[in-house]
């Protein structure tokens, strides 16, 4: 079991998440890697191992987020992207839980 599968196994019964691979998502990934995908309140996230760390062995993940924000001068919301790098499996699990519970604000 790789690290992403291990993380998914810890959170899959609590939240509506998908375990897939980057090419199946068709989201612009340039390498094939396992990905956890989730949505909460119109915000999407992808959790995967960093491209520069092919065998992460518990370290260096990417938590990528896409969200929409409406401003007073725009009729349509604009899409924004951000990301950060959980350094351990435990941090990645915590980020998934905080995201799905609405504890991360954008």
Image (cartoon, rainbow, N blue to C red):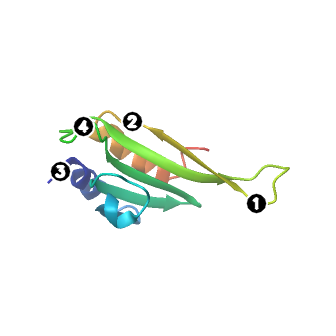
Q: Are marks 3 and 2 in contact (CB under 8 Å)?
A: no
Residue on which disc 3 sits:
2
Residue 85, label in figure: 2
Q: Residues within 10 Å of mark 2 (few under 14, many from 20)?
A: some
Mark earlier in primary sequence (3, 1): 3
For the residue labelled by badge 1, is the local secondary structure a helix, a strand or a loop? loop
Distance from the alpha carbon under mark 3 to that under mark 1: 40 Å
- Tell me the residue at 30%/35% (across/down): 60
Residue 52 in the image: above or below residue 2: above
Residue on which disc 1 sits:
76
Mark earlier in primary sequence (1, 4): 4
Residue on which disc 4 sits:
53
Q: Residue furthest right?
A: 73
- Quadrant where the C terminus lies? top right
Pinpoint residue 12: horizontal percent, then vertical percent.
32, 62
Distance from the alpha carbon under mark 3 to that under mark 2: 18 Å
When asked about the image quadrant of residue 95, the answer is top left
Mark earlier in primary sequence (4, 3): 3
Distance from the alpha carbon under mark 4 to that under mark 2: 12 Å
- Tell me the residue at 33%/66% (across/down): 24
For the residue labelled by badge 3, is the local secondary structure a helix, a strand or a loop? loop
- Tell me the residue at 34%/46% (across/down): 93
Q: Residues within 10 Å of mark 3 (few under 14, many from 20)?
A: few
């Amino acid at each position: 079991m790789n690290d992403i599968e291990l993380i998914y196994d810890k959170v899959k019964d609590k939240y509506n998440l998908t375990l897939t691979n980057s090419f199946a998502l068709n989201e612009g990934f340039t390498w094939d890697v396992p990905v956890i995908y989730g949505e909460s309140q119109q915000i999407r996230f992808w959790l995967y191992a960093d491209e520069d760390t092919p065998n992460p062995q518990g370290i260096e993940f990417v938590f990528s987020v896409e969200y929409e924000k409406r401003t007073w001068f725009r009729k349509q919301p604009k899409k924004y992207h951000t990301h950060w790098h959980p350094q351990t499996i435990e941090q990645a699990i915590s980020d998934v839980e905080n995201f799905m519970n609405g504890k991360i604000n954008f």
